Image: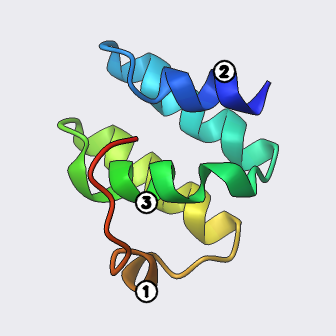
Amino acid sequence: MVMCYICLLEHENQQSRKGACRALGILSASKALHPLTFLSGNDPAETVREEARAVLLKMRYNVNELTSFETTKI
């Protein structure tokens, strides 16, 4: 199930991406750490970037420390 939500992070619809972020946060999916970090700084929609940051904070990850990871694609 987690991988389905991770795949949705690449959906063209921003509400789908935002919902996927939220679902991954509810699941506390550590596999989503890098994709969420990438979205938090690179998604074209500000609301998705904000949701990704909020989820990372909820999962107790420091967004600023995570952005040092080299991520080029989800």
Q: In 3D space, how far apart are the residues under numbered discs 2 and 3 (Cα atoms)?
A: 17 Å
Count numbered badges in the picture. 3
Looking at the image, which is closer to me, 1 or 58? 1
Looking at the image, which is closer to me, 33 or 40? 33
Quarter of the image where one finds residue 74? top left
Q: Residues within 10 Å of mark 1 (few under 14, many from 20)?
A: few
Q: Looking at the image, is mark 2 or mark 3 earlier in the sequence? A: 2
Q: Which residue is mark 3?
A: 37
Query: The residue tagged with tag 3: helix, strand or loop?
Result: helix
Vertical order, 10 against 26 (above or below):
above
Task: Name the residue located 44 percent from the left edge and 77 percent from the top edge.
Answer: 66
Question: Residue 65's mark?
Answer: 1
Q: Which residue is mark 2?
A: 4
Task: Name the residue located 37 percent from the left edge and 40 percent from the top edge.
Answer: 48
Query: The residue tagged with tag 1: helix, strand or loop?
Result: helix
Left of 34 or right of it: where is 4?
right
As shown in the figure, which amino acid type bears the numbered disc 3? Thr
Question: Residue 33's mark?
Answer: none
Q: In 3D space, how far apart are the residues under numbered discs 1 and 3 (Cα atoms)?
A: 10 Å
